[in-house]
Amino acid sequence: MNSEQDLYWMQYALQLADKAEQSGEIPVGAVLVKDGKVMGEGWNQSIQLNDPSAHAEMQAIRQAAKRIGNYRLLDCTLYVTLEPCAMCAGLLVHSRIKRLVFGARDAKTGAAGSVIDIVRHPVLNHQLEVTAELMADRCAAKLSDFFKRRRAEQKAARKNEP
């Protein structure tokens, strides 16, 4: 895909991240695209669903697999606002997604090059093409602003305790 399309889909993923934030979740959004069409979309819902696997990528991939009717998501690109964790990176490999485009790096749990590189690990039977740090500043700012606000809210709540 060209960079114009990549920018379009990352902006779409950022809108999905807003849905997560509106429900009190960490603002991460993901959209899975094939031939210019949305196959699946998702945002973090771990808290809401009481499900530690309900990451944005997981939600988008589950939806896409149902829509496509196959657990192999060949020739698809996943756009996600934050570098996938090890769980999600493993899912990308198993689902045979062709390409990953992500926004902000995750220096603590990133599994597409920051901490470990599962999606391009040479011993695995599938590797993804990766485009890293697309709109990274905007994606990182969304997360940073969320956590700053959350810490301020927690501090205010402690202050108001008897």
Image (cartoon, helix red, strand yellow):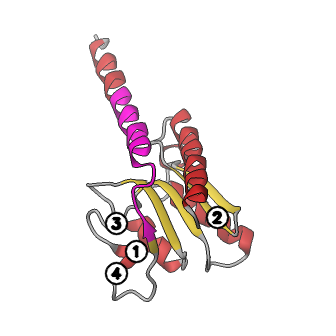
Residue under the point 30% across and 58% down:
109
Q: Label 3 crowding class (10 Å Cα cut-off): few <14, some 14-19, many 20+? A: many
Q: Is residue 144 above or below residue 58?
A: above
Which residue is label 3 attached to? 111
Figure check: 19 above or below 136: above
Magenta-tinted stretch? 130-150
Q: Which mark is residue 121?
A: 4
Q: CA distance from mark 1 to mark 2?
A: 18 Å
Q: Quadrant of the N terminus?
A: bottom right
What amino acid does circle 4 point to? Answer: His
Earlier in the chain: of badge 3 and badge 1, it is 3
Q: Do labels 3 and 2 touch, CB within 8 Å?
A: no
* Residue at disc 3, secondary structure: loop
Q: Tell me how far mark 3 sits from mark 4, CA to CA.
A: 10 Å
Residue 90 at x, y percent in the picture: 43, 73
Q: Are marks 4 and 2 in contact (CB under 8 Å)?
A: no
In the image, what residue occupies the spot 46% across and 85% down?
Answer: 126
Nearer to the camera, 113 or 131: 131
Q: Are marks 4 and 1 in contact (CB under 8 Å)?
A: yes
